[in-house]
Amino acid sequence: MADAADGTLRSRFALRARLLSPLAEGGLLDVADGLLETDAAGSITRVGQWPERDAPDALDLRPLVVLPGLVDLHVHLPQIPNAGLGSGLDLLTWLDRYIFPLERAYDRGVAEEQAPQAWRAFAAAGTTTVLAYAALWADSTDAAFAAAEAHGIRAVIGKVMMDRVTYDEGIDPVRILETSLRQSDELAARWHGRDDGRLRYAFTPRFAVSCTPEMLRESAALAAHHGAYWQTHLSEDPGEIGEVRRLFPGARDYLDVYDRARALGPRTVLAHAIHLSEREVQRIAESGARVAHCPASNLFLSSGLMPLGAYRAAGITVGLGSDVAAGPDLSMFGVMRAAAATQRVLELTGRAGSSRSLRPIDWLRVATLDGARALGIEDGVGSLEVGKEADLIAVDPRFTTPLPGADPPTVADDLASRLIFRPHPNMVRAAWVRGRLLAGPPGLEGIG
Ligand SMILES: [Zn+2]
């Protein structure tokens, strides 16, 4: 049973709390006084109303709210130290000035120091699943994986691949093609599927500007061979799109560059995807590729406003990404807020189409279950449902009230609204993956 003293839920455990979660079949789990139980492997065996009789011995987390852990579909580990720098620069200038020097320096030593801190910071923000880019270097990617393995977070990571336009002229693009493919292949063999699938590999060609057609094609073939993910950036900013047109004159459009590499499919995650033609939207939907919407980043770099409603209507699976460091904050609650603001602006300027405006509770679904669907792991995580793994966070809604002592909202949509629009950096008190408590959040002392 649970060790209530330190909240270390390593084995079978039960907790009592307010429960709030999207459900796979649609609708909402919304229980004011709920029970969630797991087995020794960290799978949820029971979830619902706190029983009036035969109640189990449980960790009492009231008045905390237990939610599914949040999913961050797009973030760059080496960039985290420069989060919040360079607002308003265009993408390519920002990369040169603030990002490439940091990534260049992200060697094994830096990764061994920073990656454990980064995983703790994700957990403190309530994120339990991360799809991340490392840097060009295999050794620091390996160190980031090792840190995730030790920490307990669910992580998909990839070594960045770039065989043209890379950090600086000191890197030989011809050698880097062969080296990058071999090293990525080795990393995937080592890490993809590790710990019963908690850790996975993503082949990570940075974007079309940085890659030759051969790099794109060969990386996609390796991803298919390993059954691993393939991630890149798509149509983030007008300068970048112009550059892609210049480099790939034979392609119909930006998306076609990746299509010709046979890189589009359900294990492909395309970040940003802001400035797309109707053809590109239809082709993404048809291919089954997923989109990581990064609204905080898109506002920070003035990249544009992604028309989420149109993509959802087309049948594309879209989750949310922080895109730190272009996004200033690891908190997915902050990303939900930026997503809502982006959709408001589209509505106000008549560009939202006929899509229904998302409610706060809908944004929680996008940041949890839809993120899991984007990774194809929705049968295992993304909601509080029997049979799924216990990837959970406990949030103290009292932090979100404007004046101390006031009661947090009881209506689910109001509660979600406070978490998104008035979040507090310390409101996530605990985070678990497969029932294992993650280091990072302040903990449950004084609760219950
Ligand atoms: Zn990015």
Image (cartoon, rainbow, N blue to C red):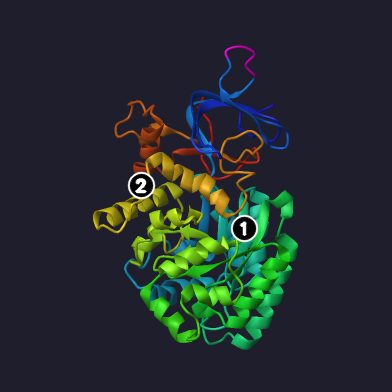
Residue 84 inside the magenta-drawn segment:
no
Q: Is residue 403 above or below residue 377?
A: above
The N terminus - image quarter:
top right
* Count of labels in the image: 2
Question: Which dot, 1 or 2, sits closer to the camera?
Answer: 2
Residue 4 visible to the viewer: no
Q: Residue under label 2, please give it.
A: 356
Identify the residue at image location x=41%, y=32%. 412
Closest to the observer: 194 or 364? 364
Q: Residue under label 1, please give it.
A: 156
Image disc number at residue 332: none
Mark 1 residue element: strand
Identify the residue at image location x=59%, y=60%. 113
Identify the residue at image location x=38%, y=72%. 237
Q: Which residues are magenta?
A: 52-56
Identify the residue at image location x=56%, y=40%. 24
| Quadrant in which residue 408 is drawn | top left
Residue 31 placed where, x, y %?
49, 26
Residue 280 placed where, x, y %?
46, 68
Q: Looking at the picture, which amino acid does disc 2 mark?
A: Arg
Q: Looking at the picture, which amino acid does disc 1 mark?
A: Val
Label 1 near ligand 1 (CB < 8 Å):
no
Which comes sooner in the sequence, label 1 or label 2? 1
Q: Is residue 245 left or right of residue 202?
A: left
Q: Is residue 176 above or below residue 283?
A: below
Residue 140 placed where, x, y %?
63, 67
Q: CA distance from mark 1 to mark 2?
A: 32 Å
User: Which secondary structure dominates the residues rendered in magenta?
Assistant: loop
